[in-house]
Image: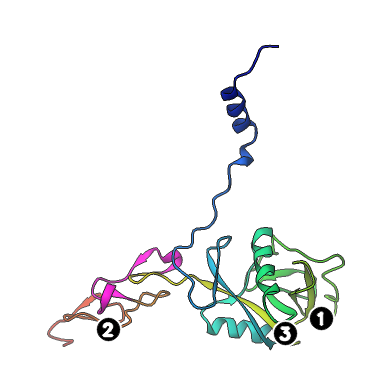
């Protein structure tokens, strides 16, 4: 048998095993402040809350922080969330997954059935008679249980990354108006409205309208 060079072996490996090339992770275009933790699996910011609320109450609390209950995309993100929970002081935490009495579980307001789930063996249970939410327990190894949504427990929130000054929108891809007053033309990172008003000669929430004789 003819000898094969090291170069030929390496090239053969690359063609035969394309999975060795790592999949690109979502890019975090902004930053996570305070106690929010960056999730490189979703490009979002995550925080575990120990105070006890029902599933609906937890969702309202997350929305008050500019986000929602967490939506877990894959096994890597699930283990990341579990790692945060293990560092917290509680035992039970709501996730953004919920089910109806037909046994269909969805993430938050999505209409389609969840693509990724990590149920413990035997779950989801009780769905025929109760409205359930998914919870992660500290002693579950990262697997989920279905539990009645009216009960109070901890929860995990997710929100978009905060944009660097001068940027806003999904993935911080949009530029604030150059006529926003203040340093770096700072604006609201969600809708782009100017935080400190407009430069002289401009009006409106987004400072895109020039002043005229009629609106001075």
Does dot 1 land on a helix, a strand or a loop?
Answer: loop
Binning the other alpha carbons within 10 Å of mark 1 as few (below 14), some (14 to 19) or many (20 upward) gives some
Along the line of sight, which residue is nearer the eye, 210 or 66? 66
Does dot 3 land on a helix, a strand or a loop?
Answer: strand
Q: For residue 61, what is the image quadrant? A: bottom right
In space, the residues marked 2 and 3 are separated at their CA atoms by 41 Å
* Labels 3 and 1: the sequence-earlier one: 1
Q: Which mark is residue 153?
A: 3
Along the line of sight, which residue is nearer the eye, 62 or 84? 84
Q: For residue 211, what is the image quadrant? A: bottom left
Q: Quadrant of the N terminus?
A: top right
Where is residue 109? Give x, y as percent. 62, 73
In space, the residues marked 3 and 1 are separated at their CA atoms by 17 Å
Above or below residue 23? Residue 136 is below
* Labels 2 and 3: the sequence-earlier one: 3
Along the line of sight, which residue is nearer the eye, 169 or 2? 2
Residue identified by numbered label 1: 130
* Labels 1 and 2: the sequence-earlier one: 1
Where is residue 62? Give x, y as percent. 58, 81
Q: Is residue 14 visible?
A: yes
Q: Nearer the viewer, mark 2 or mark 3?
A: 3
Q: Residue furthest left?
A: 213
Residue identified by numbered label 2: 197
Which stretch appears magenta? 169-186
* Labels 2 & 3 near each other (Cβ < 8 A): no
Does dot 2 land on a helix, a strand or a loop?
Answer: loop
Which residue appears at 61% of the width and 37% of the height? 18
């Amino acid at each position: 048998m003819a000898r094969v060079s090291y170069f030929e072996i390496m090239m053969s490996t690359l063609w035969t095993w394309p999975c060795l090339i790592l999949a690109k992770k979502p890019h975090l275009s902004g930053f996570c402040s305070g106690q929010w933790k960056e999730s490189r699996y979703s490009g979002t910011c995550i925080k575990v809350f120990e105070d006890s609320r029902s599933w609906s109450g937890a969702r309202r609390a997350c929305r008050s922080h500019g986000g929602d209950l967490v939506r877990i995309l894959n096994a890597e993100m699930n283990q990341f969330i579990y790692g945060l929970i293990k560092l917290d002081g509680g035992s039970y935490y709501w996730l953004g997954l919920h089910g109806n009495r037909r046994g269909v579980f969805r993430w938050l307001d999505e209409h389609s059935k969840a693509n990724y789930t990590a149920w413990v063996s035997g779950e989801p249970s009780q769905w025929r008679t109760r409205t359930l939410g998914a919870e992660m327990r500290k002693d579950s190894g990262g697997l989920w249980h279905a539990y009645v949504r009216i009960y109070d427990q901890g929860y995990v929130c997710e929100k978009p990354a905060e944009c660097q000054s001068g940027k806003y929108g999904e993935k911080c891809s949009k530029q604030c108006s150059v006529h926003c007053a203040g340093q770096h033309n700072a604006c609201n990172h969600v809708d782009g409205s100017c935080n400190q008003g407009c430069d002289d000669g401009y009006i409106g929430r987004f400072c895109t309208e020039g002043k005229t004789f009629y609106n001075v």
